[in-house]
């Protein structure tokens, strides 16, 4: 093992605009002395995000997991929900928190999203909804999922944690489904330190969600639902407003990094670059590669090799959600039921991609991958 003399490179880093640009927002908060409960900056960010994302209504949250939990409550989802095993655990955890049984369905080998062709066979009389994920920001087959949902009278809630700013064939991917849920965690393309949001189709739904995220209060003395404390603070909203000023620049740099990786790794035997599938505007939230049998190292050996060179990648998503103790007892979690997801999870590595990543950093990553051949 060579000594780790080079500075570390991480799979992602939050985009941080100049600190001095944040000071005026902090001054507004200090002057107003409004720190939370839907203050002026919170309202301003909701309006700005609706405009940027091309949607009509957004409800901001303290984080994406609370937003998922609340989205399920807002639509009164019960029983069983069909979802993917290939995601971050919050997707399925949100179901358990609502007393809902997850039903795992395998993924498509190309998109790595929930495979629509496998959904119908998993539907039972207890199925009430589908919870797909736009994995790595790659849009699901929204038309096929809508067709199935319409036939069986199911709700569709999209986990769009990776999909900020993604455009599909008909505009914002957020406009699909009954609700779409975003994450603004520090690792995401757009972040508010911690945060999340639900994209709502109409004002009535947004009003219900706003009640639910604030303990169910309709006014000072009226509680209309068993709500939770899911509100985004003014500090987080302020950082979101600042981030939004720089988001196009950040997305452009991510696109450049994506292009360099693809060009340099295209001819490497046993390495497949995932993503950029179909006609859509991507946000390059992640850069996943699949390590195949033609590569001289296993996925885990390459992961360790990169780590030995101070390059910290992530095996997103490994293990599968369905492999964790609270899920693996479910019939749908059987690995024999999920052959594609099992295969992909054992071969995937997400390479570093974030706006501050330099070209030298990128070529350092590529060099370590190439030298194994």
Image: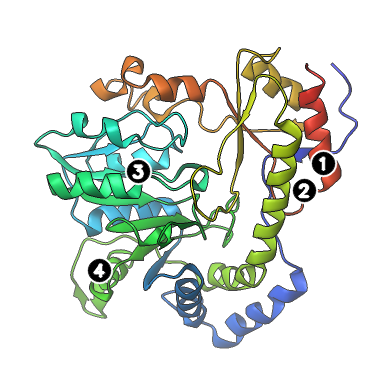
In this figure, which residue is indicated by the disc labeled 3?
A: 132
Query: How many numbered discs?
Result: 4
**Disc 3 and disc 1: Cα gap in Å?**
34 Å
For numbered disc 3, what is the local secondary structure? Answer: loop
x, y (%) of residue 215? 29, 65
In this figure, which residue is indicated by the disc labeled 4?
A: 205
Q: Residue at x 18, y 54 (%)?
A: 76
x, y (%) of residue 163? 49, 53
In this figure, which residue is indicated by the disc labeled 2?
A: 357
In this figure, which residue is indicated by the disc labeled 1?
A: 361
Q: Local crowd at mark 2 within 10 Å, few (<14), some, or many (≥20)?
A: some
Q: Local crowd at mark 4 within 10 Å, few (<14), some, or many (≥20)?
A: some
Q: Is residue 306 left or right of residue 170?
A: right
Q: Is residue 114 left or right of residue 253?
A: left
192 versus 254 height, above or below:
below
Mark with earlier residue (4, 1): 4
**Disc 4 and disc 1: Cα gap in Å?**
45 Å
Q: Residue at x 50, y 75 (%)?
A: 45
x, y (%) of residue 188? 57, 52
For numbered disc 4, what is the local secondary structure? Answer: helix
In which quadrant of the rendered view does residue 89 lie? top left
85 versus 227 height, above or below:
above
**Disc 2 and disc 4: Cα gap in Å?**
40 Å
Whether residue 310 is visible here, answered yes or no, is no
């Amino acid at each position: 093992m060579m000594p780790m003399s080079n500075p570390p490179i991480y799979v992602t880093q939050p985009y941080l605009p100049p600190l001095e640009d944040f000071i005026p927002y902090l001054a507004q908060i200090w002057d107003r002395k409004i720190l939370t409960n839907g203050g002026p900056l919170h309202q301003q960010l909701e309006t700005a995000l609706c405009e940027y994302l091309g949607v009509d209504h957004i409800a901001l949250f303290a984080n994406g997991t609370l937003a998922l939990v609340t989205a399920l409550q807002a639509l009164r989802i019960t029983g069983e929900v069909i979802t993917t095993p290939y995601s971050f655990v919050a997707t399925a955890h949100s179901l358990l928190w609502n007393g809902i049984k997850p039903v795992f369905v395998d993924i498509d080998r190309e998109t790595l999203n929930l495979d629509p062709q496998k959904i119908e066979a998993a539907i039972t009389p207890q199925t009430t909804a589908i919870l797909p994920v736009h994995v790595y920001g790659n849009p699901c087959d929204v038309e096929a999922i809508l067709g199935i949902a319409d036939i069986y009278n199911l709700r569709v809630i999209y986990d769009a944690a990776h999909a900020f700013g993604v455009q599909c064939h008909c505009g914002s991917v957020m406009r699909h489904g009954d609700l779409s849920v975003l994450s603004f965690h520090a690792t995401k393309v757009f972040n508010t330190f911690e945060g999340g949001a639900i994209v709502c189709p109409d004002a009535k739904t947004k009003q219900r969600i706003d009640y639910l995220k604030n303990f169910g209060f309709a006014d000072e003395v009226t509680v209309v639902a068993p709500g939770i404390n899911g509100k985004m603070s003014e500090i987080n909203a302020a950082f979101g407003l600042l981030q939004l000023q720089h988001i196009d620049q950040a997305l452009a740099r991510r696109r450049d990094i994506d292009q360099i990786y693809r060009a340099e790794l295209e001819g490497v035997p046993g390495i497949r670059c995932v993503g950029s599938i179909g006609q859509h505007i991507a946000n390059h939230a992640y850069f996943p590669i699949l390590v195949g049998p033609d590569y001289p190292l296993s996925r885990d050996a390459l992961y360790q090799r990169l780590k030995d060179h101070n390059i910290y990648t992530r095996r997103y998503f490994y293990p599968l959600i369905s492999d964790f103790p609270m899920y693996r007892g479910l019939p749908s979690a059987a690995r024999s039921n999920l052959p594609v997801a099992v295969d992909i999870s054992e071969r995937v590595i997400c390479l570093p991609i974030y706006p501050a990543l330099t070209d030298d950093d990128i070529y350092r990553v590529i060099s370590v991958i190439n030298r194994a051949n």
